[in-house]
C-alpha cells in the first residue's frame, strides 16, 4: 500500500537536472519520517497552541492523503489528476511564506495556508478544522521532511505600516511595475498576458500561469494589501515568481501594491484616487528603463 | 538513473583497483612538498550536434543585443580541434587533508549578458562564494533548481537592470541547473564540487591546480555527455595528465 | 377496527416507503471524481456529512477555490452517480392480522435477498455560484420519482449569507435523514422526523421528507454559523398541487464551537409551522384529471414542529441528538381528518407529542464506523377522547456498523450490517403493544 523507496518521478527529476550524481541522493523513507515524528522539530507552535504531529495522523488520512500521499511526497492517488500538483512535503518548499526565498516558512505560514487554501488549485480552504487540528497538521507536515530537522525557518520579512494612498504613490507604483518588469509575465495591464507568460514552468517543469489581476480572483497567499506586499518580497518558491526583496524598497513595494489594486476589476479606493491621473498602461515595447 | 550511474562508478573503481593500490604506494613515496597539478584536454569524437539558434523574440531587448551575432544554444560547445568546452573536471577520489577542506577565496562570477549566461557553466567549491551579476537592461530572475535531498535548497530572485550582484554559496556537491523563467532559453549550470576543480576552455584544455603529489581520480562532467573518470598520479614537479574523449551521441 | 387496519396499512406503506427512500442520500463520487477527494473528506462516513462536507454543500457544492465552475472540468466529465444496496434482510412483526390458514393475530417473519431502490444522483455547478441537484430515485421495482430537483443561486453579491434555492429539496436538517447511516426497514428513517400519534392524519409536517419550495440559506465563511428559512408547499413534496393552497414555513439556525482536540460542537434549533387542508372538493382527495389537476383542498388548519439539535464530538466518539415537539390542529386528530367546515366532535383536542433521539457513532477510522441509535416518541396529548394516554408511544433501537473497504475518489463501497427493534404501545390490532424487528446484511455502493 505505502509506496516507499522507488519514486519514479523524483528519479526522473534528478536525471533531468543532473545527468550526474556528485553525491548519492538520500530518499526520504517512511522509517526516517517515523524517527522525525518524535523530534521536537516536528512539533508546531502557533500562538498559544502546540501542535503534535501524531494527533493529526487520522485527520491527514481522512482529508489530505488522497493528494499529498502517505509519505507526504505529493504522490497521493489523486495527484495525477490534479493541476497544479499537490505540495511535496518532503521537499518543504512552500509558496506562501513570510520568510525569504529558499528558507523554511514559519509554523503560522503553513497554519494560515491550510485554512485559506490555494485559490485556483485543488487545495480548498480547510477552515472547518479546529485551530488545534490545524496546529497538529502543521506538525504532521513538518515530520515529512529532513529540512525541519536541520534548518530553522527564515527571518520573517518586516512589513512597515501601510502609508496613505496618494496619486503620486500610485504613479510611482506603476513605475516600479515597469522598472522591475512585472509586465514580462503579468502583462502591461495585469492580464497575465506578458510576453513570457505562455512559456512559464514551475519547478517540476509543468506549465504554470501568472496571476491575472484583471480577473479579480483571490491572490494565492491571502487577500489583503499586506499579503500582496509580502508576495514581492518572498517570491513563491516552486514557481517562476521570484523574490524582489533585494530590488524593491519597502516604500516602493507599497506603491506597487497601490498600483496593482487599480488593475483589479472591482471598485477600490486606489482606483478612485488614480482616476484623475489618467494612467495609461505601460508600454511593453520599451526596451529597458 | 543515478543508481545505475553509481554502479558504473563502482565498476570503474573496481577495475582500476589494482592500479589504484599501486598508485597509492607510489604516491606515498613522493614528498608532499610543492603543489602539483593535473592538466589535459577534453575532446569530442564524432560530429558535434547542431546547436539550434535561439528565438529571443519574447524580449525585444535581447533580440537587439544579438542583431549581428545570432545566439545559439550552448549545450555542446566544440573548439577547432574537437576540444570540448564547459566540461567540469574535479577530484572525485584521493583528496585528503587541507586541500580537501580548504575553500578558495576567489569568487567565480556568472554574468547575465545579452540574455545569456556568461559563462554557461560555472564551477565552485562547496561553500565557496560566487556572484551572479547582470549587465543587461532587462529583468532576469535567477532560479537554481537543486535536486531534492542533496542538501542544497533552491531559491528564486529577480535581478532587474542595474541590480546589485547576488552573492551566495552552496552547501553540497551537485550540478545545479539554473533557469531564468522570464527568458526560458536561459539555462546554465552552477556546478558545486568538493576540492580543486577546473573547467575546460574553448580548446578543451584544463588545469586543476593546487594538488599535493598523490594519486587521484579525476572526474570529467559534461551536461550532455555525463561523466568519465581517470586515475592520475601527480608527482612533485611533474603534473599529472589526463585526457578525456566524449563520444558525440 | 378501522383504525387498526389503518395502522397495519401505515406499517406496510412505511415499509414500502423505507425500501424506496431509505437510500436517497447524497454520497456523490461525482464530486469526489471532480475534486480528487476521497469520500472521507466530505463524509464522516458516507452518506453522512462532516463539517467540511456540510460547508461544501452550503457553498453550493463548491470548494470555493475558483475551480468549481464546470468550465474547469474535462469536457467528458458528467457529474452522475448511482447508488444501490443489494442485501439480505429479515423482517419480523408480532401480532399481524392474518386471514387464511390461521386466524387471529400471528407473528410474521420474512427473510430473503432483496434490493433497495436505485438513486441516480446528478449535481454540481452550472456555473460559478449556480448549483443544481437532480435526483431521480426509484423503488426496488424501478418506478422512478423525483426525490430532489433544485437549482440554487449561491453567494449572491459575493456574500455567503445570501443563497437562494428553488425546487424540491431536503429541509436544512443538520441531522439529515437523506444521509442516514442506518438502513433497515425500521431504522432507515428518523422516527422523530415522521412520528405522529395513531389516528393523526396530518402527513404534511414530516421534517424528514423532501419538500417543494423556496429556501433562503446563509452561513459564515467557515460555516460555523448557519441560518436558513424556507417557504414550502404543504403537500409533503408531492408534485401536481395535490393539496392546493397551504404553505409551510421552515426555519433553522445553528452555531458551531471550536473545542480544540475534541472537535467542533454544533447546536441548533429548527421550527416548522404551516397550514394544510382538512378536506377536499374531490371525493377521493386526489387531484382531478382536468383541467389543472387541482384537488381543491379546503379548510386549512395549522400544525407545528420545533426541535433542538446537537452534534457533539469527543474525538472518535460523536453524538447526534434531537428533541422535537410536535403539535397538530384538532382537525387532524382523526383519520381521515375532520373537515374544518364541520363542528369538532366533543372532546377532540390538538394532538401533541415529544420525540427524543440520540445517535452515537464510534469512528474507528475513516473506513469503519459503529452506529447506535435510540429513539423515543411520547404522545403528550391524545387528539381523540377515550384513547389511553400512552397509545402510540414508541421506542426504537438500532445498532450496526459500516465498513468501507473501498473508499477512493471514484467509488464507495460499504459492507453494512445492522439490527433494529421497534415497539409501539397499544397499536396492535387487539390494542396491545406491537413489536417488530429488522436484520440487515448488505453491500451499499455507489459510483
Image: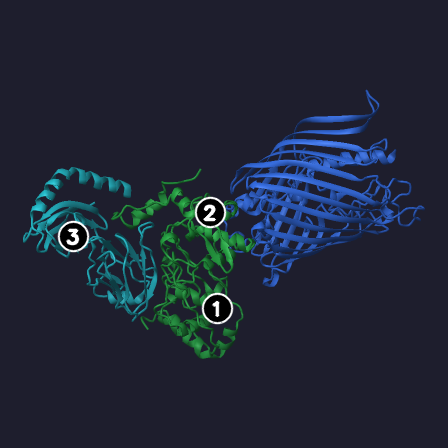
Chain colours: A green, B cyan, C blue
Which chain hosts label 3?
Answer: B
State the CA–CA distance, disc 3 to disc 1. 52 Å
Q: Position of residue C419 (x, y in %)?
A: 67, 33
Question: In front: A136, or C101?
Answer: A136
Disc 1/disc 2 C-alpha distance (Å)? 31 Å
Q: Which of marks 3 and 1 is in front?
A: 1
Residue projecting furthest to the top? C101
Pinpoint residue C8: horizontal percent, then vertical percent: 80, 33
Q: Mark 2 lies on which chain?
A: A
Give the residue pinned by disc 2: A67
For the C terminus of chain C, the quadrant is top right
Q: In this view, does C238 lie above or below B162?
A: above
Q: What element carries label 2?
A: helix
Residue marked by disc 1: A225
**If the image is split into quadrants, where does the N terminus of chain C sit?**
top right
- Is label 3 in contact with label 1 (beta carbons under 8 Å)? no
Vertical relation: C348 (above or below) B189: above
Considering the numbered disc 1 on the image, is that residue within a helix, a strand or a loop?
helix
Identify residue for label 3.
B84
Decide which of A258, B168 is in the foreground and name it.
B168
Q: Same chain for marks 1 and 2?
A: yes
Residue A155 figure quarter: bottom left
Amino acid at each position: 500500500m505505502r509506496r516507499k523507496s522507488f519514486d519514479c518521478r523524483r528519479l526522473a527529476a534528478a536525471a533531468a537536472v543532473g545527468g550526474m550524481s556528485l553525491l548519492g541522493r538520500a530518499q526520504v523513507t517512511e522509517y526516517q519520517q517515523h524517527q522525525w515524528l518524535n523530534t521536537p522539530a516536528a512539533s508546531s507552535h502557533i500562538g498559544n497552541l502546540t501542535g503534535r504531529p501524531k494527533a493529526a495522523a487520522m485527520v491527514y488520512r481522512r482529508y489530505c492523503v488522497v493528494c499529498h500521499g502517505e509519505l507526504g511526497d505529493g504522490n497521493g492517488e489523486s495527484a495525477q489528476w490534479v493541476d497544479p500538483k499537490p505540495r511535496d512535503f518532503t521537499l518543504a518548499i512552500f509558496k506562501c511564506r513570510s520568510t525569504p526565498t529558499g528558507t523554511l516558512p514559519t509554523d503560522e505560514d503553513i497554519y494560515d495556508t491550510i485554512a485559506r487554501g490555494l485559490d485556483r488549485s485543488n487545495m480548498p480552504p480547510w477552515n472547518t478544522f479546529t485551530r488545534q487540528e490545524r496546529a497538529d497538521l502543521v506538525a504532521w507536515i513538518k515530520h515529512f521532511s529532513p529540512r525541519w530537522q536541520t534548518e530553522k525557518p527564515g527571518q520573517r520579512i518586516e512589513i512597515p505600516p501601510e502609508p496613505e494612498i496618494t496619486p503620486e504613490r500610485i504613479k510611482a507604483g506603476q513605475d516600479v511595475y515597469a522598472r522591475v518588469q512585472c509586465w514580462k509575465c503579468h502583462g502591461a495591464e495585469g492580464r497575465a498576458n506578458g510576453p513570457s507568460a505562455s512559456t512559464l514552468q514551475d519547478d517540476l517543469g509543468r506549465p504554470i500561469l501568472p496571476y491575472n489581476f484583471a480577473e479579480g480572483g483571490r491572490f494565492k497567499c491571502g487577500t489583503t494589501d499586506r499579503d500582496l506586499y509580502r508576495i514581492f518580497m518572498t517570491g513563491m518558491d516552486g514557481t517562476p515568481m521570484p523574490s524582489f526583496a533585494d530590488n524593491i524598497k519597502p516604500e516602493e513595494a507599497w506603491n506597487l501594491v497601490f498600483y496593482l489594486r487599480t488593475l483589479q476589476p472591482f471598485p477600490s479606493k486606489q482606483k478612485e484616487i488614480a482616476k484623475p491621473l489618467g494612467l495609461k498602461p505601460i508600454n511593453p515595447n520599451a526596451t529597458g528603463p | 538513473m543515478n543508481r545505475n550511474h553509481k554502479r558504473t562508478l563502482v565498476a570503474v573503481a573496481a577495475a582500476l583497483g589494482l592500479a589504484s593500490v599501486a598508485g597509492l604506494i607510489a604516491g606515498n613515496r613522493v614528498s608532499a612538498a610543492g603543489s602539483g597539478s593535473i592538466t589535459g584536454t577534453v575532446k569530442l569524437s564524432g560530429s558535434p550536434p547542431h546547436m539550434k539558434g535561439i528565438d529571443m523574440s519574447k524580449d525585444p531587448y535581447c533580440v537587439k543585443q544579438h542583431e549581428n551575432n545570432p545566439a545559439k544554444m550552448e549545450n555542446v560547445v566544440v573548439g577547432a580541434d574537437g576540444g570540448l568546452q564547459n566540461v567540469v573536471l574535479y577530484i572525485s577520489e584521493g583528496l585528503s587533508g587541507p586541500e580537501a577542506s580548504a575553500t578558495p577565496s576567489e569568487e567565480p562570477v556568472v554574468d547575465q549578458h545579452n540574455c545569456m549566461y556568461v559563462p554557461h557553466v560555472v564551477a565552485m567549491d562547496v561553500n565557496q562564494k560566487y556572484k551572479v551579476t547582470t549587465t543587461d537592461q532587462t529583468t532576469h530572475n535567477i532560479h537554481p533548481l537543486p535536486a531534492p535531498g542533496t542538501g542544497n535548497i533552491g531559491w528564486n530572485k529577480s535581478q532587474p537592470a542595474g541590480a546589485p550582484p547576488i552573492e551566495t554559496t552552496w552547501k553540497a556537491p551537485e550540478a545545479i541547473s539554473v533557469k531564468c523563467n522570464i527568458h526560458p532559453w536561459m539555462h546554465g549550470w552552477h556546478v558545486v564540487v568538493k576540492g580543486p576543480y577546473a573547467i575546460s576552455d574553448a580548446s578543451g584544455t584544463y588545469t586543476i591546480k593546487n594538488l599535493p603529489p598523490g594519486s587521484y581520480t579525476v572526474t570529467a562532467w559534461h551536461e550532455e555527455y555525463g561523466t568519465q573518470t581517470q586515475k592520475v598520479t601527480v608527482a612533485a614537479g611533474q603534473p599529472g595528465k589526463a585526457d578525456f574523449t566524449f563520444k558525440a551521441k | 377496527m378501522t383504525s387498526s387496519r389503518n395502522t397495519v396499512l401505515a406499517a406496510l406503506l412505511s415499509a414500502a416507503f423505507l425500501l424506496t427512500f431509505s437510500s436517497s442520500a447524497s454520497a456523490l463520487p461525482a464530486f469526489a471524481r471532480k475534486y480528487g477527494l476521497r469520500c472521507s473528506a466530505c463524509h464522516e462516513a458516507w452518506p453522512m456529512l462532516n463539517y467540511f462536507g456540510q460547508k461544501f454543500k452550503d457553498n453550493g457544492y463548491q470548494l470555493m477555490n475558483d475551480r468549481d465552475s464546470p468550465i474547469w472540468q474535462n469536457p467528458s466529465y458528467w457529474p452522475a452517480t448511482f447508488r444501490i444496496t443489494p442485501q439480505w434482510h429479515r423482517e419480523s412483526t408480532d401480532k399481524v392480522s392474518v386471514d387464511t390458514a390461521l386466524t387471529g393475530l400471528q407473528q410474521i417473519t420474512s427473510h430473503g435477498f432483496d434490493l433497495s431502490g436505485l438513486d441516480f444522483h446528478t449535481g454540481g455547478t452550472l456555473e460559478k455560484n449556480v448549483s443544481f441537484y437532480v435526483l431521480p430515485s426509484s423503488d426496488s421495482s424501478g418506478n422512478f420519482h423525483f426525490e430532489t430537483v433544485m437549482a440554487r443561486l449561491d453567494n449572491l453579491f459575493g456574500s455567503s449569507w445570501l443563497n437562494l434555492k428553488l425546487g424540491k429539496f431536503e429541509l436544512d436538517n443538520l441531522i439529515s435523514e437523506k444521509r442516514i447511516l442506518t438502513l433497515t426497514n425500521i431504522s432507515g428513517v428518523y422516527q422523530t422526523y415522521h412520528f405522529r400519534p395513531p389516528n393523526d392524519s396530518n402527513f404534511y409536517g414530516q421534517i424528514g421528507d423532501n419538500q417543494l419550495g423556496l429556501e433562503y440559506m446563509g452561513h459564515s465563511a467557515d460555516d460555523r454559523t448557519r441560518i436558513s428559512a424556507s417557504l414550502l408547499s404543504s403537500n409533503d413534496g408531492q408534485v401536481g398541487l395535490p393539496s392546493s393552497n397551504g404553505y409551510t414555513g421552515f426555519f433553522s439556525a445553528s452555531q458551531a464551537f471550536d473545542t480544540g482536540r475534541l472537535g467542533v460542537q454544533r447546536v441548533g434549533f429548527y421550527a416548522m409551522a404551516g397550514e394544510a387542508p382538512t378536506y377536499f372538493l374531490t371525493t377521493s382527495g386526489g387531484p382531478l384529471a382536468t383541467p389543472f389537476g387541482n384537488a381543491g383542498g379546503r379548510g386549512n388548519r395549522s400544525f407545528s414542529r420545533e426541535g433542538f439539535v446537537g452534534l457533539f464530538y469527543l474525538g472518535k466518539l460523536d453524538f447526534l441528538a434531537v428533541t422535537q415537539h410536535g403539535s397538530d390542529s384538532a382537525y387532524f386528530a382523526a383519520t381521515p381528518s375532520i373537515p374544518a367546515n364541520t363542528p369538532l366532535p366533543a372532546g377532540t383536542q390538538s394532538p401533541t407529542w415529544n420525540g427524543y433521539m440520540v445517535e452515537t457513532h464510534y469512528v474507528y477510522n475513516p473506513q469503519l464506523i459503529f452506529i447506535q441509535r435510540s429513539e423515543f416518541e411520547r404522545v403528550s396529548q391524545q387528539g381523540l377522547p377515550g384513547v389511553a394516554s400512552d397509545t402510540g408511544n414508541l421506542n426504537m433501537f438500532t445498532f450496526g456498523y459500516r465498513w468501507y473497504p473501498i473508499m477512493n475518489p471514484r467509488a464507495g463501497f460499504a459492507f453494512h450490517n445492522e439490527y433494529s427493534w421497534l415497539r409501539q404501545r397499544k397499536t396492535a390490532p387487539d390494542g396491545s403493544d406491537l413489536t417488530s424487528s429488522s436484520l440487515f446484511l448488505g453491500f451499499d455502493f455507489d459510483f
